[in-house]
């Protein structure tokens, strides 16, 4: 499913006061110099075969036309590259022409970007062609990159000279303060490895906002923010960054008041003309959790009305049977899995979000609103039971399909609970076969559903199996989509644009500390 929304003449509704507050909360960026930890080359430019380099140093390698050299910076980093090139042989009589390929994973290093033909722009693929007219030359691409590996391929020098690399380093960037990081979760080897992969992920996505991924799209998404904030509370505790992002979403919205799925911050804050029904509703959850974490009354006062407005907008799409029609507002996302029938999940998401709006109302001393919403939720739950519960199969069915994502959202909405819900998840594998969940984002909600009905062991087992399989596959940070049985799955029509450091995927940092 391609997620592309274009609204002609879209003009976001901006609130200067809220945007000014967001600006005041712009974070400090911390920088650190990182040198390569290893060096190797690929047998051929796009080969997966690694050839080791004796001595493991780059300074002695002489590169001619067609040669490549790969630098391993030892871990995933976000930052800017500095490279010093020199000529070897006769005086250079032609420019050195090189290609830089930045890769978050080893597999990405061997991909040929020309073969990518998906619906997400190929301009995200991290590569640059550079001419050095004179040598020696200091080369520093203007773009910030997210990578562990760097491949330098020499497109050409000249018959008179070859190329050497005299120095190379990354100046890393993050708004996560390593000195302020909270103690790590102490688990066994497997859980500790999962924790540190997840912590690295949130760290590297913390920039001037919580970026979904520092490779792509490098910006703020509402649904991502809700989970990023949780991961942040358990690790770096940069609560002002969460606040800044909430104010950005509130400060630039759809003309009709909807919180956009995503907000651009440069050159000026501007809501994207994309509405995701689920994300719009999660604004209330993110605000509620932020308030519970910080007790920040200023934010509650400024943003409460906007959070409740999102709920009211969604309530207007509920039909006479008590069933919501989120698709009238924008995309109903739920997960990237192809073929997922989303009606029941949309109903569950509404009930779930209304639950947070109730809590928010109580935090704000708004009893009447809380009671009104509680009543609505009871109706929505009855409607969900009536339309989506299949008593023969003893599970929820949407459009004839009993997907695991459907069960998750119905349980999180309280449409089944206790033993009934637990019995559903005892058969989780059957539902998973019906439609495989594709993102760690959806797996997060699965874990939360398991915990809500007392299946703690299954939840921990699932963290070990799912996130553990990322560690086993060699990821330093969490990928945005991950299907252990199909490592090259991509919702975009090609893995070249997949992000391998995606903060919606790193919630075990929070889950492990809170529940285990
Ligand atoms: C992708 C990004 C982002 C997500 C949206 C729905 O573009 O991965 O994280 O929120 O999809």
Image (cartoon, helix red, strand yellow):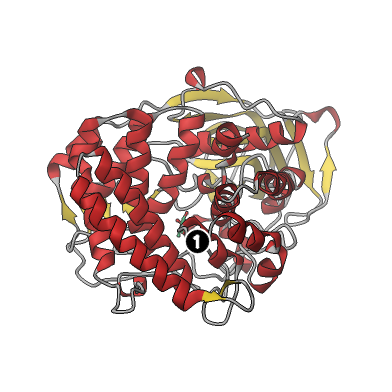
Measured as percent of width and height from the top left, residue 357 is found at: 30, 50
Q: Can residue 261 be seen in this view?
A: no
Measured as percent of width and height from the top left, residue 405 is found at: 56, 64
Measured as percent of width and height from the top left, residue 290 is found at: 35, 37
Count numbered badges in the picture: 1
Report the front residue among 388 and 219.
388
Measured as percent of width and height from the top left, residue 171 is found at: 51, 28
Residue farthest along the bottom direction in this orientation: 400
Report the front residue among 281 and 397.
397
Would you say 496 lies left or right of 474 here? left
* Residue found at x 54% / y 47%: 502
Picture quarter containing residue 433? bottom right
Q: Is residue 357 visible?
A: yes
For numbered disc 1, what is the local secondary structure? helix
Report the front residue among 270 and 408.
408
Picture quarter containing residue 83? top right
Decide: few, some or many residues near mark 1? Use Cα within 10 Å; few <14, some 14-19, many ≥20. Answer: many
């Amino acid at each position: 499913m391609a997620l592309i929304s274009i609204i002609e003449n879209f003009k976001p509704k901006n609130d200067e006061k809220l945007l000014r507050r967001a600006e005041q909360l712009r974070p400090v960026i911390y920088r650190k110099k990182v040198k390569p930890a290893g060096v190797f080359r690929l047998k051929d430019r796009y080969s997966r075969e690694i050839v080791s380099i004796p001595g493991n140093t780059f300074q002695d390698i002489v590169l001619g036309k067609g040669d490549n050299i790969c630098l391993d910076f030892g871990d995933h980093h976000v930052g800017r590259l500095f490279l010093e090139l020199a000529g070897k042989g006769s005086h250079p009589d032609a420019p050195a022409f090189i290609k830089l390929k930045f890769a978050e994973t080893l597999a990405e290093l061997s991909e040929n970007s020309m073969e990518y033909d998906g619906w997400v722009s190929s301009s995200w693929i991290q590569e640059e062609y550079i001419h050095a007219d004179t040598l020696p030359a200091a080369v520093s691409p203007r773009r910030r990159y997210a990578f562990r590996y760097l491949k330098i391929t020499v497109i050409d020098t000249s018959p008179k000279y070859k190329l050497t690399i005299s120095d190379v380093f990354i100046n890393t960037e993050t708004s996560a303060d390593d000195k302020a990081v909270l103690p790590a979760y102490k688990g066994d080897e497997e859980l500790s490895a999962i924790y540190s992969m997840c912590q690295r992920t949130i760290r590297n996505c913390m920039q001037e906002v919580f970026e979904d991924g520092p490779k792509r799209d490098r910006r703020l998404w509402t649904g991502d923010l809700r989970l990023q904030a949780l991961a942040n509370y358990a690790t770096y505790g940069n609560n002002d960054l969460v606040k800044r992002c909430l104010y950005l979403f509130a400060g630039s919205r759809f003309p009709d008041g909807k919180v956009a799925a995503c907000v651009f911050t440069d050159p000026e804050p501007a809501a994207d003309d994309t509405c995701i029904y689920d994300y719009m509703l999660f604004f209330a959850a993110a605000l509620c959790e932020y308030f519970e974490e910080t007790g920040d009354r200023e934010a509650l006062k400024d943003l409460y009305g906007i959070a409740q407005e999102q709920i009211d907008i969604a309530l207007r799409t509920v039909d006479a049977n008590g069933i919501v029609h989120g698709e009238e507002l924008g995309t109903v996302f739920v997960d990237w899995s192809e073929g997922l029938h989303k009606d029941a999940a949309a109903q569950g998401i509404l009930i779930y979000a209304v639950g947070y709006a109730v809590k928010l109302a109580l935090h704000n001393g708004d009893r009447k609103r809380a009671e009104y919403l509680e009543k609505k939720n009871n109706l929505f739950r009855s409607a969900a039971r009536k339309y989506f519960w299949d008593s023969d199969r003893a599970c929820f069915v949407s459009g004839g399909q009993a997907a695991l994502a459907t069960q998750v959202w119905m349980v999180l909405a309280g449409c089944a609970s206790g033993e009934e819900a637990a019995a559903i998840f005892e058969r989780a594998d059957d539902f998973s076969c019906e439609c495989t969940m594709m993102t760690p984002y959806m797996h997060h909600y699965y874990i939360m559903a398991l915990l809500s009905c007392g299946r703690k062991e299954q939840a921990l087992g699932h963290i070990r199996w799912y996130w553990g399989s990322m560690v086993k596959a060699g990821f330093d940070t969490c990928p945005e989509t991950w299907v252990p049985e199909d490592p090259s799955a991509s919702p975009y029509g090609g893995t070249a644009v997949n992000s391998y450091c995606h903060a919606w995927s790193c919630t075990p940092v929070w889950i492990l500390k809170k529940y285990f």
